[in-house]
Amino acid sequence: MKSQVREANGSARRIMDGTTTGGEKSRVGLTQNNPR
């Protein structure tokens, strides 16, 4: 059970970093909302 929780935390962290496809999608939306 601990290993499953660890994997879930790692995937969530990866999405926040934007390394996963889901993270990249959210990052693209953010860049479109406020371009710099």
Image: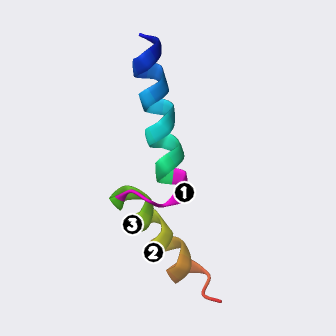
Q: Position of residue 23 (x, y in %)?
A: 44, 59
Q: Earlier in the sequence, mark 1 or mark 2?
A: 1
Residue 28 disc label: 2
In front of the other: 10 or 24: 10
* Local SS, label 3: helix
- For image coordinates 53% across by 44% down, the residue present is 13
Q: Residue 26 is drawn in which quadrant?
A: bottom left
Amino acid type for the residue under numbered disc 2: Val
Q: Position of residue 25 (x, y in %)?
A: 39, 66
Label 1, on which residue? 17
**Rendered position, 19 above or below 9:** below
Main SS class of the magenta portion in the image: loop
Point out the residue furthest to the right here.
36
Q: Earlier in the sequence, mark 3 or mark 1?
A: 1
In front of the other: 16 or 31: 16
Residue neighbourhood size for the residue with mark 1, other residues' Cα within 10 Å, grouped as few (<14), some (14–19), many (≥20)? few
* Local SS, label 1: helix
